[in-house]
Image: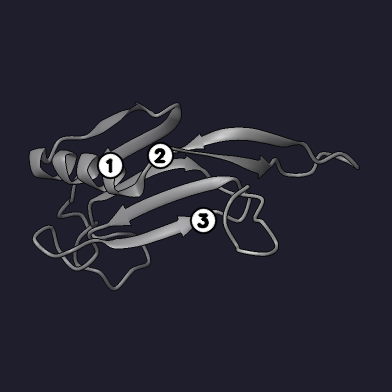
């Protein structure tokens, strides 16, 4: 677990910077893969962040060329810190990962969270 500072999206002229805990992505991946192995929907809290896993469905997504709705897992809050996995190539293939950490304040010299 890493402690970092995050800039909360601006409200009017004020933009707060708050400390927060960011989980180790390898632990998050392990948990998501465990959920994926069960194939059952899960929604809850992980390391203080809201999270959800939705298993693959045979239903075709509206307006998509995909033949099924892929399984996905997400954790976090978009715009602050958000991480997701999507098994868009099929449930037996490696998932595609996405990390949105644009709200994390970076050290200008080394690029690490401060």
Contact between marks 3 and 2 (CB within 8 A): the answer is no
Left or right: where 22 falls relative to 62: right
SS for dot 1: helix
Mark 1 and mark 3 lie on one chain; the one further toward the N terminus is: 1
Mark 3 and mark 2 lie on one chain; the one further toward the N terminus is: 2
Which label lies toward us, 3 or 2?
2
Left or right: where 20 falls relative to 93: right
Q: Residue 18, percent across and down?
A: 68, 34
Contact between marks 1 and 2 (CB within 8 A): the answer is yes
SS for dot 3: strand
Q: Which residue lies at the image location 23% right of the left edge and 57% below the top edge?
A: 70
The residue where tag 1 is placed is: 27
Q: Which residue lies at the image location 45% right of the left edge and 31% below the top edge?
A: 49
Left or right: where 57 falls relative to 44: left
Q: Which residue occupies the foreground of this view, 42 or 22? A: 22
Q: Residue 47, percent across and down?
A: 40, 29
The residue where tag 2 is placed is: 23
Gap between marks 1 and 3, in whole Å? 17 Å
User: Residue 100 got which mark?
Assistant: 3
């Amino acid at each position: 677990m890493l402690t970092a500072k995050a800039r909360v999206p601006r409200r009017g002229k004020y933009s707060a910077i708050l400390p927060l805990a960011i989980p180790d992505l390898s632990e998050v991946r392990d948990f998501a893969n465990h959920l994926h192995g069960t194939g059952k929907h899960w929604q809850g809290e992980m390391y203080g962040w809201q999270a959800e896993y939705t298993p693959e469905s045979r239903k075709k997504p509206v307006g998509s060329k995909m033949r099924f709705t892929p399984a996905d897992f997400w954790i976090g809050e978009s715009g602050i810190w958000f991480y997701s996995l999507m098994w868009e190539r099929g449930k037996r293939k490696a998932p595609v990962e996405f990390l949105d950490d644009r709200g994390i304040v970076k050290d200008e010299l080394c690029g690490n969270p401060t």
